[in-house]
Image (tube, rainbow, N blue to C red):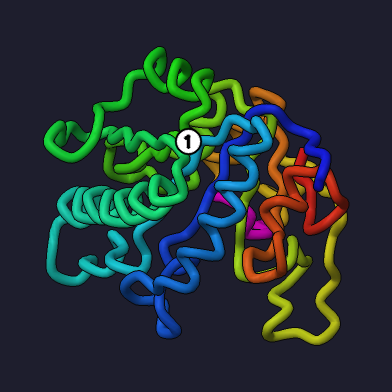
């Protein structure tokens, strides 16, 4: 059994992390792999918040050519709720209590986000899934992850990606790409390393909140990241 480094974490997932082979929709097998780790962490006493994107359904930029930006962004926020409800359903099927909290009120399917209630849920051992981003257009789910992590006083953001860390250039395009074990917030911003958007990075920097970037598709990677194992890249 793993020993874990953190008591309270914020896990940031992309929508594609649970999407099909083409990145679209929801793939049951991928969803189960993510949920199995979340369940194990919760059973170990770790308090878990999750922010999930909606790239498997919709991105605001998809409508750039034919709709107003705010409308496209709101569509993306609503789409995150689909993924949040799917996560909730599967986590609760494993007998782990869960709450979905949305930045846009839709009380028939989820609770509105209220920080004090979110903190109480975490203290009671419930996994809290934050949907609808920040509730504002022009802000990404990266920014939502940073904001919620700071608000719930998480010790770290576990940023699950499709690459095993942060590189000086795209490792899929360049064979000589060099992986960093540790970088600073300012280095990530100034070198445009693609960790998170600038708003999210700045918020983390101002609040001294570390970000651990790692590959979701590696075995037990979320659990290994939570244990403090030296995987991926730490940004601090």
Is residue 192 depicted above or below 199 in this figure?
Answer: below
Is residue 226 depicted above or below 29 in this figure?
Answer: above
Residue 137 horizontal side relative to residue 52, left or right: left
Q: Residues within 10 Å of mark 1 (few under 14, many from 20)?
A: many
Is residue 165 depicted above or below 185 in this figure?
Answer: below
Q: Which residue is mark 1?
A: 127
Could you tell me residue 230's position as x and y percent? 87, 52
Residue 199 horizontal side relative to residue 155, left or right: left
Is residue 68 depicted above or below 29 in this figure?
Answer: above
Could you tell me residue 30's position as x and y percent? 49, 70
The residue nearer to you, when weighing 219 against 176, is: 219
- From the image, which quarter does the C terminus lie in? top right
Asked if the magenta segment contains residue 193, the reply would be yes
Q: Can residue 143 be seen from the camera position used here?
A: no
The quarter holding residue 228 reads top right
Could you tell me residue 122's position as x and y percent? 50, 24
Tell me what residue is drawn at x 15 percent, y 56 percent: 68
User: What is the magenta segment's predominant secondary structure?
Assistant: loop
The residue nearer to you, when weighing 107 against 171, is: 107
Asked if the magenta segment contains residue 23, the reply would be no
Tell me what residue is drawn at x 33 percent, y 19 percent: 114
Could you tell me residue 19's position as x and y percent? 41, 72
The quarter holding residue 134 reads top left
Tell me what residue is drawn at x 19 percent, y 54 percent: 75
Highlighted range, magenta: 192-196
The quarter holding residue 24 reads bottom left
Q: Can residue 84 be seen from the camera position used here?
A: yes
The residue nearer to you, when weighing 143 against 42, is: 42
Residue 227 horizontal side relative to residue 198, left or right: right
Tell me what residue is drawn at x 71 percent, y 59 percent: 221
Q: Secondary structure at mark 1?
A: strand
Residue 26 horizontal side relative to residue 29, left or right: left
């Amino acid at each position: 059994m793993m020993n874990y480094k953190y008591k309270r974490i914020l896990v940031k997932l992309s929508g594609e992390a649970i999407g099909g082979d083409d990145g679209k929709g929801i793939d049951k097998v991928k969803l189960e792999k993510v949920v199995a780790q979340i369940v194990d962490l919760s059973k170990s006493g770790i308090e878990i918040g999750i922010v999930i994107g909606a790239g498997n359904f919709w991105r605001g930029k998809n409508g750039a050519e034919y709709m107003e930006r705010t409308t496209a962004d709101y569509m993306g926020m609503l789409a995150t709720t689909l993924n949040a409800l799917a996560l909730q359903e599967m986590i609760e099927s494993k007998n782990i209590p869960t709450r979905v909290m949305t930045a846009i009120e839709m009380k028939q399917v989820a609770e509105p986000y209220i920080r004090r209630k979110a903190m109480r849920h975490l203290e009671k051992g419930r996994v809290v899934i934050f949907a609808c981003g920040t509730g504002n257009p022009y802000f990404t789910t990266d920014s939502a992850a940073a904001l919620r992590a700071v608000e719930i006083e998480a010790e770290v953001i576990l940023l699950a990606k499709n690459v095993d860390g942060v590189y000086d250039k795209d490792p899929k395009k360049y064979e000589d790409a060099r992986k960093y074990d540790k970088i600073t917030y300012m280095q990530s911003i100034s070198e445009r390393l693609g960790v998170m958007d600038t708003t999210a990075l700045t918020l983390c920097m101002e609040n001294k909140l570390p970000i651990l970037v790692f590959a979701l598709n590696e075995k037990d990677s979320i659990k290994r990241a939570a244990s403090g194992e030296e995987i991926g890249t730490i940004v601090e």
